[in-house]
Amino acid sequence: MQIEELTSEEFKKLRETIKSIIIPVGSIEAHGPHLPLGTDLFTIYEISKKLVKEVKIFLSPPIYFGLCRSTRDLPGTITLKGETLKSLLLDILESLYHQGLRNFIILSGHAGGTHNAYLIDTAEAFLEKYGDARFFIADIIKLLKEILQELGIPERDSHAGEWETSLMMYLKGELVRDLSLAFEDYPTFPKFWVLKEKENYWSSGIWGNPHKASKEKGKILTEKLLQKLRDLLSDFIQ
């Protein structure tokens, strides 16, 4: 159930028995010449919308913005500071808690390491104040890891490549551009360096091979991911 589509009275009645909510988090960042800037948001939000049709759980309006380090200088990327993301999410969580919800499922379509660290740090800070709250936090790559192995998609394919392009072709195909514009790319950042000019090492926004993508793979990925989420959340939302 998408909160923004409910009336106040409908929400009031449903919250008597439903205490769990998904908060989708994405990013606006470069995803090569073939995928839209909102890819990280679109994938996880569309999957979340499918999930709440099967599982009795609320779905929050999504957070479009995230913390983007490696792509921050690429055209179109809009990034938040980590503390801004944390502050925004804390406000949303506190409001939802005030409305009677206790089980918070934060699903991130953006898998940046620093971004995800702030999501976990937010949950830790919230638990210090509200000890009866519960958190489930996962990013899309960690959720898909075993599924990608099953399908033979290499681990280094991580951004705007085979699996992410496949998901977009299935979930939001009208937003996928001509794949002939895309290309295979695997950037290499110097190990242990913290770089200012990241664009010098990754200018494409692609990390993988989008030419191996297909709508059929996207359908398989979506169905398997939905099943995995149903299994993972079966105990959490009780």
Image (cartoon, rainbow, N blue to C red):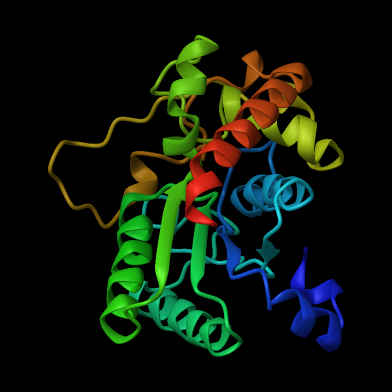
Q: Position of residue 221 (x, y in %)?
A: 64, 26
| Residue drawn at 72 percent across, 36 percent down | 168
Q: On the image, which quarter does residue 175 sit in?
A: top right
Q: Position of residue 78 (x, y in %)?
A: 54, 66
Viewer-side residue, 227 vs 153: 227
Outermost residue to the left: 192
| Residue drawn at 69 percent across, 64 percent down | 59
One can see residue 137 in this view: yes
Q: On the image, which quarter does residue 160 sit in?
A: top right
**Would residue 65 appear left or right of 81 to someone viewing this image?**
right
Q: Position of residue 75 (x, y in %)?
A: 57, 55
Count of number-bearing discs:
0
Quarter of the rendering occupied by the C terminus: bottom right
| Residue drawn at 80 percent across, 41 percent down | 172
| Residue drawn at 63 percent across, 48 percent down | 44
Quarter of the rendering occupied by the N terminus: bottom right
**Would residue 3 appear left or right of 191 to someone viewing this image?**
right
**Would residue 184 appear left or right of 124 to someone viewing this image?**
right
Q: Position of residue 211 (x, y in %)?
A: 65, 16
Viewer-side residue, 144 vs 214: 144
Q: Is residue 78 above or below residue 185?
A: below
One can see residue 166 in this view: no
Q: Is residue 142 above or below residue 178?
A: below
Viewer-side residue, 109 vs 128: 128
